[in-house]
């Protein structure tokens, strides 16, 4: 198991939050090993997740993503060395090239390209990290997963688990997010705000973090500061419908009717089928 990667480590490789990795796994796009309540990923799992994430970012429908990843797994197999491969776009298809040979797992029209060798080098760097650091990250992830499981039955225990995860791995952004949400739900938006700010120090361009911080700021410091973070969330993700709706309401309260209408119209366009 020592060569397998944790959810948090895969998230760092893909430059996404751990919640995104877990979401991809739940769709059945790969079958990582389980250790306790957490996942452990081999290199083929990482390649499949990277391909799925990139295809999803390019608005490929879920069925197309699944077909491409399944065909990719069939073509490559678990015993095929992957470090010399390159994935790229070939017209309307995902293409895989190995030297002079190419094949295309079918999917919708996309733009996709990444060098598997570069990904392999990043995986090796994580695997070669000091054993103590990897153990701390593994413990953090176990505490985080325990918090997720406890939320519906014991919010206080869940909060303690998230706090333990942060103590083990101060860069585990999802733990700040979930703990901040629990603090806000418990009636302490100021504590939630402080947790979101700590998360933003580590991941400043995450639109969801700016959105969550804005919600906490509405209840702790008023609309002006909240507007700033709603607008920042929308700079990072113009399609964030809830951010358009919330900031429109604040602009309406502040008497800025033109700005409010602009965001209400944007919200309506995004939610209409």
Image (cartoon, rainbow, N blue to C red):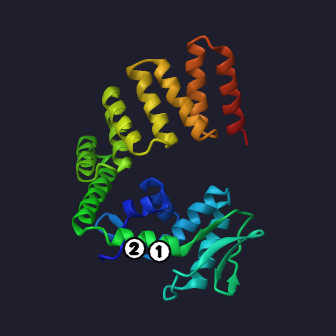
* Residue tagged 1: 120
User: Which one is nearer the viewer's eye here, 215 or 147?
Assistant: 215
State the residue at coordinates (49%, 18%): 224
Q: Is residue 90 above or below residue 233?
A: below
Helix, strand or loop status at disc 1: helix
> Mark 2, residues whose alpha carbon is within 10 Å: few (<14), some, or many (≥20)?
few
Q: Residue furthest right?
A: 91
Instruction: Give the Cα separation between the discs numbered 2 and 1.
Output: 6 Å
- Asked which quadrant contains residue 250, the reply is top right
User: Which one is nearer the viewer's eye here, 60 or 154?
Assistant: 60
Q: Which mark is residue 78?
A: none
* Residue 226 pos. (x, y %): 48, 24
Taking the image as shown, residue 151 lies to the left or right of residue 19, namely left
State the residue at coordinates (39%, 73%): 124
In the rendered image, is residue 183 in sight? yes
Q: Quadrant of the N terminus?
A: bottom left
> Mark 1, residues whose alpha carbon is within 10 Å: few (<14), some, or many (≥20)?
some
Q: Is residue 24 above or below residue 182?
A: below
């Amino acid at each position: 198991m020592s060569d397998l990667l944790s959810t948090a480590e895969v998230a760092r490789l893909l430059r996404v939050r751990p919640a995104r990795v877990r979401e991809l796994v739940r769709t059945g796009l790969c079958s990582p090993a389980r250790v306790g309540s957490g996942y452990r990923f081999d290199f083929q799992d990482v390649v499949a997740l990277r391909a799925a994430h990139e295809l999803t970012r390019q608005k490929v429908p879920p069925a197309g993503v699944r077909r491409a990843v399944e065909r990719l797994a069939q073509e490559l197999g678990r015993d095929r060395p992957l470090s010399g491969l390159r994935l790229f776009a070939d017209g309307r298809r995902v293409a895989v090239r190995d030297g002079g040979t190419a094949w295309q797992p079918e999917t919708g029209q996309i733009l996709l390209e990444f060098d598997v060798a570069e990904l392999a080098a990043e995986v090796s760097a994580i695997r070669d990290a000091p054993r103590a650091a990897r153990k701390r990250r593994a413990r953090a992830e176990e505490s985080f997963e325990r918090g997720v499981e406890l939320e519906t039955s014991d919010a206080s225990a869940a909060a303690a688990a998230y706090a333990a995860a942060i103590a083990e791995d101060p860069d585990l952004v999802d733990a700040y997010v979930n703990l901040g949400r629990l603090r806000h739900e418990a009636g302490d938006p100021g504590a939630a705000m402080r947790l979101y700010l700590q998360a933003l120090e580590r991941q400043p361009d995450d639109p969801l973090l700016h959105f969550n911080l804005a919600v906490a700021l509405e209840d702790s410091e008023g609309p002006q500061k909240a507007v700033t973070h709603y607008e920042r969330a929308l700079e990072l993700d113009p399609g964030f419908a809830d951010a358009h709706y919330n900031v429109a309401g604040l602009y309406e309260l502040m008497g800025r009717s033109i700005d409010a209408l602009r965001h209400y119209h944007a919200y309506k366009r995004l939610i209409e089928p």
